[in-house]
Amino acid sequence: MRTIEHWIGGKHVAGGDGRLGDVYDPAVGKPQAQVHLASPVEVDLAVRAAKDASEAWGQSSVTARTRVMFAFRELLARHELDLAKIITAEHGKTVDDARGEVIRGREVVEFATGIGSLLKGAYSDQVSAGVDSFSFRQPLGVVAGITPFNFPIMVPLWMHPVAIACGNTFVLKPSERDPGVSDLVAQLYAEAGLPDGVFNVVHGDKVAVDAILDHPDIAAVSFVGSTPIARYVHDRGSKSAKRVQALGGAKNHAVVMPDADLDFAADHLVAAGYGSAGQRCMAISAVVAVGAAGDTLVDKVRERTEAVKVGPGSEQGSEMGPVVTAAAQERVLGYIDAGEAAGAAVVVDGRGLTVDDHDGGFFVGPTLLDQVTPDMTVYTDEIFGPVLMVLRVPTLDAAIELVNANPFGNGTAVFTSSGEVARTFQRRVTVGMIGVNVPVPVPMAFHSFGGWKDSIFGDHHIHGPEGVRFYTQAKVVTSRWPHVSEESLAQLNFPTAQ
Ligand code: NAD
């Protein structure tokens, strides 16, 4: 069976203590590869490689770094399908969906090619007699990224192009569920001319994560994953005096007003709820039907849900693939059972779905629940599967109250034909990313991505301008070039401008 090794200092390195993890093909439910799981020894090796490369890379010109990003961008474009196929094989999403994440990730590289403008400092002339002052930002040194299974290329790409373009070196710990694509990314960086040691990949689980969080030579950690682990990573990383940005889980609501185009809304709710089998941090999970929208909307969503084509992600015509693991399948099915037992109406039932010739695959059919109430576990917990639920409320105020009472605050959307409703919604919801008739409002690379409340720990959103700030530290220089005969004017009082 194929084994996936770490990438350290520009070459493959096998694991130290021999621990291996299975990498499944979720469409058939069988292991297809094994991944080396790092011990603290391999993590230290990667950090040392990154530290050794850091001095020269941090001193390299902005132009040199930008050139690598341009070349890397071209290689990502050329290998778009290769990258997507690896993702499909290990994650299970359809190839077209995987291509989408390659493209959205590549957009961050395009953003990073403009790093010269983004790192420009500010200059103040003559802040005192003969004194000028200017500020600029410098890299932190070695930084690390820990990423989830659901976007195995895009989420890491939210991090490393920005960090590296800013002059840092990087250690990536991707998800052990679908680690394969990171290996090709490392090779494409090398082909683009990135010096050895600037980008390293260590595969692993909690052991590797803890070694990263405790390592004294790592200055900052970016994390994306579930809320309990995000909270843990933030706490532990902060204790060892690192900068930490930790993005957590989500429960995204779409509020549908009676004045919305309900066909348009239903199309988009089904796409946003079941795309990638609901395994997107920006997936719509809870549909909040306001007033008279309810019954008609449920009918329209039901029709479309029943028409979703479920099958292996690699097969032409599949619109939705399996979930990632047997444990995920079991968890999602358990939530549907619990919702039904608590009184939710199962309008479309995805339990018991079988896919021809793929009996062992981790499939769950798209499921639609109605009459869900805020006390049910299907609502309180992040399910992370193809389950859309409908809650009914009488007014926009009640809908906003429901969204705001939820501890997660990643994404939300409103469907309406009223500008006034949209404006009220966007100003009052306590959520970081908002769509108006846009169900999956993932910001472009030149904005930053991030939620509020339990969907983030740390004060920086990811990529975009916030990413540049996260991966750099500020310097302010106050300078004077006195004429040789000039009187010094030095005195023991605190200096003030002359
Ligand atoms: P996860 O939290 O299980 O894993 C994320 C990373 O943490 C992985 O690299 C994993 O190896 C590591 N990890 C897992 N358990 C750990 C532990 N006990 N100690 C230390 N490290 C550990 O998340 P996942 O299942 O891979 O991904 C799905 C989750 O990620 C969902 O909750 C989803 O909402 C979230 N997510 C959030 C965003 C966002 O931008 N907010 C984006 C994508 C995914």
Image: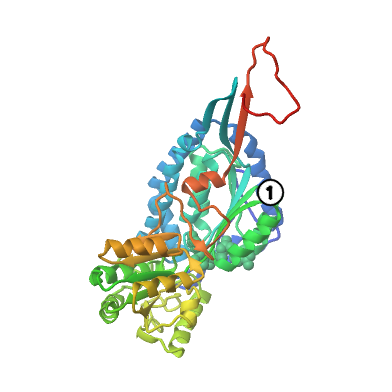
Position of 67 compared to 417: left or right? Answer: right
Quick one: SS at disc 1?
helix
Does 96 appear above or below 219?
below
Residue at (32% x, 76% y) in the render: 290
Q: Position of residue 319 (x, y in %)?
A: 33, 68
Position of 415 compared to 112: left or right? Answer: left
Indicate the quadrant containing the N terminus: top left, top right, bottom left or bottom right.
Answer: bottom right
Position of 169 compared to 404: left or right? Answer: right
Residue at (41% x, 47% y) in the render: 107
User: Residue 23 is drawn in which quadrant?
Assistant: bottom right
Residue at (49% x, 31% y) in the render: 63
Residue 38 visible in image: no
User: Residue 84 is drawn in which quadrant?
Assistant: bottom left
Q: Position of residue 127 (x, y in %)?
A: 57, 26
Indicate the quadrant containing the C terminus: top left, top right, bottom left or bottom right.
Answer: top right
Does 45 appear above or below 439?
above
Residue at (59% x, 39% y) in the render: 474
Q: How many marks?
A: 1
- The quarter of the image that holds ligand 1 is bottom right
* Pick the front one: 485 or 415: 485
Residue 126 visible in image: yes
Q: Position of residue 451 (x, y in %)?
A: 48, 60
User: Residue 227 is drawn in which quadrant?
Assistant: bottom right
Report the residue marked by disc 1: 45
In the image, farthest residue toward the right: 492
* Pick the front one: 56 or 480: 480
Does 470 appear above or below 136?
below
Position of 61 compared to 255: left or right? Answer: right
Amino acid on which disc 1 is placed: Leu
Q: Residues within 10 Å of mark 1 (few under 14, many from 20)?
A: some
Q: Position of residue 490 (x, y in %)?
A: 72, 22
